[in-house]
Amino acid sequence: MTSARPPYEVFEHTADAGIIARGGTMAELFANAATGMFALMADLDRIEEREEREIEVEARDREGLMVNWLTELLYYLDAQELLFRRFEVADIDGDWLRARAFGETIDRARHVLHAGVKGVTRHLLEIAPEDGGYRARILFDI
Amino acid sequence: MPKPWKSILQKLDGQRWLLPQDYKPGMRVPGLIYASEEMLGIIGEDQAIEQVANVAFLPGIVKYSMAMPDIHWGYGFPIGGVAAMRLDDGVVSPGGVGFDINCGTRVIRTDLTEEEVRPVLREIVNQVFRDVPSGIGGSGQVRVSGRQIDDVLVRGAQWAVAQGYGWPEDVEAIEGRGALAGADPDKVSRRAKERGGPQLGTLGSGNHFLEVQVVEAVFQPEAAAAMGISGPGQVLVFVHCGSRGLGHQTCQDFLDRMEEASGRYGIELPDKQLACAPVRSAEGQDYLGAMTAAANFAFCNRQLITHWTRLAFQRVLGRDARADLGMFVVYDVAHNIAKIERHRVDGHEMELCVHRKGATRAFPPGHPDVPARYQKTGQPVLVPGDMGRYSYICVGTEQAMAETWGSSCHGAGRVQSRHAAKRMLKGVDIAQRLLDRGIYVRAQDRSLLAEEASEAYKDVAMVIDVLDEAGIAKKVCRMRPIGVVKG
C-alpha cells in the first residue's frame, strides 16, 4: 500500500451506510471494498475460512464492475448463507474481474451479525486515483 | 454546509412548501414538500430536498416532485418521495421504488388486552423470535421449489392462503388483495429467485420489525371500529418488512439495464441512481412485470409471517387464534412501489405511473380499490414510528387523492445516521432501557438496537400531525409497543 490510511472506513449517511475503500492497486481496492462491505454486516474476526468461491464478474465500466462484484457477493450471502472475510482479486481490467472469496456459512451462535446490506447503490459512487493508488466511495442500502 | 432552504422554498401554508421549478435548470415541475416549519430545519440538514429537485428532472413527471414530512436523504429518490409520470411520455425508475420492493406494513388485531398479554409477553415475543427468522440471511420455514416460486410471484398472499398459511378473508385486507395484476415471473432473474427463495417468511434486518403493540389513543372511534379496534388497552401486532433478497436483486438487475437504457433514450439524469426508461418501452414493461412479481413475493412473505405469529400466540396462550383471539388482518400496504393508477389531472381522468418511495397509498372513502369494510372510512394507512415511542393508523382522504396521488407518509424518518446513533448511545444498554419502560425486545444484533433507537428518528407524531392538518391522512389511533422482534 502506498497510503498509510485504513483499507476501508465508514462514511455517514442519514438512512444508510457507506464505505470509503482504498488500495494501492485496482485489485487491492476491489478486495478492500468487499472486506469493508462485510465488515458492516459482521465482525470479521469471528469468521473462519472454511469455504471458498471462485467469482467472475463483468460490467460496462469500472463503477459498474464495483457494483456487480459486491452484488455477486451478496448473492452468496443470501442464496448460500456465506459470510466472507477475505478476498483475492487475481485478475482485473476495466470491465472484468476474477477473484476468490474466503469465508464460511453463517453460524448464529458464533457470528456477530449487524444490519444487512440490501443493495449497492450508484448514488455518490466514485472510483478515483489517490496518492498513487485508488479510492472508492460506495453507498449501500441498509 | 446545509443550503438556506427556508429562503429557497416558498411557504404556501403551515404544512406546504414549494420548491420553485427554477431552483435548478432541468427541473420539469416544481417540488412540493409537506412539513411544519420546525421539521423543515431537520429535513434541510442533509440532501433530501436536493433529491426532490433531482426527481423533478424525470421525463413525464406530472404536477410536482412531492415529499412527505418523513422525507430523508435516500440514494436517488428521497425516502418519502412521491412522483407520478404520464404513460405516453413518462418513465418508470427502479430507484423510485428502491431495493426493497414492496417493503410495507401489516397490522393484525386481537381480542386481547394488555392485562392478558403482560404475564406471557416474554413467551410470546420469544416464540415469535424463534418462528419468524430475522437478521442477515435467515431461512424461513417454507421451502419453495423452482416452479413454486413462480406461483408465489403471481399469486402472492393468495398462494400462501391456498397452502394453508392464513385465512381466506386475509386477502380482502391487503392492497391489491395480496396479488397485484401484471406480475411476470419470467422477468425476475434466476439469481433473484435463488436469493429470495430461502427467505420466504423472514423479517430481514435494518429497520424491519415485528411489534406487539397496545392501543393508547383512539381519535376516530367509527373508523377504528371498522378495523376491529375498540379502544385503549387492546393488543395489536404490527409487521414491517419486504421482499428480501428477491426484491433487492430485481432492483439491482434493472438498475443496470436502465442505466444503459437511459443513455440510449437520451434521458439526462442528475444522479445515476435515477436511471429509468419510458414506461411503454420494453425495459419499462419488463421492470414493471418483475417489480410487480417481487411485490407479490413481499405480500406472501408478510402473509407467512402472519401465520407463524398467529401460531405463536395460539401456542403460548393455549387459545385458538381465530375463534378465541380474533387475530384478523386490519390491513397490509406497500410503501416502496410503482403502480399504474387512475387519477384526475386538471379535470381529466388519466392513467399514471405512481412511484411511492417510502410513501404509503392513502385512498379515500368510496374508492373502488378500498376493501368493502373501509368504503365509508377510507383505506387504512399504517405508519410505524420507532420502537421506543409509538405508531399510528390513519385513513386516506379525498384531499390525498386530489393532491398527492392518494399517498401519505410511511414512518418517522431518520435524523441520525446509523453510526452517529451508535456513537451517541455507546455504553447504553438499549434493551434494558426499553425494558425499564415495559418494552421487551429480542434482536439478533444488540448493536442494531442503538441504530434503531428513538434518538435516531423524528417523532412520528410530528409527521402525522402535518398530514392530518393538511387533510392528507386523518389519524385513527395511536399504539405503543410492548414487545419487539428485530433483526
Image (tube, grey):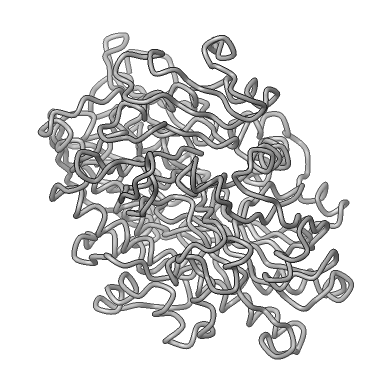
| Residue depicted at 40% across the width and 51% down the height | B337
Q: Where residue A73 sits: x, y (%)?
A: 31, 48
Is B354 on the left or on the right of B58, as rendered? right
Asked where in the image residue B30 lies, by quadrant, the reply is top left
Q: Residue at 46%, 83% (x, y): give it.
A: B161
Q: Between residue B416 and residue B179, name the one nearer to us.
A: B179
In the rendered image, the residue lying farthest to the front is: B347
- Which is more toward the observer, A100 or B91? B91
Q: Which residue is located at x 65 percent, y 56 percent?
A: B443
Q: In the displayed image of the protein, which residue is found farthest to the left?
A: B264
Q: Is any part of residue B453 visible from this angle?
A: no
* Residue A124 point in image, percent of width and height: 36, 25
The percent coordinates of residue A7 (x first, y second) are 40, 25
Residue positioned 76% across, 59% down in the render: B220
Dividing the picture into quadrants, the one containing residue B486 is bottom right
Question: Relative to residue A13, is residue B97 depicted above or below?
Answer: below
Q: Is residue B325 left or right of residue A38?
A: right
Please count the marks in the image.
0
Is residue B154 in view from this perspective? Answer: yes
Q: Is residue B471 above or below residue B149?
A: above
Q: Could you say where residue A33 lies in the image, as x and y percent from the top left?
A: 35, 32
Q: Quadrant of the C terminus of chain B?
A: bottom right
Q: Is B283 left or right of B221, judged from the image as shown?
A: left
Q: Quadrant of the N terminus of chain B?
A: top right
Is residue A79 or residue B306 the one in the foreground?
B306
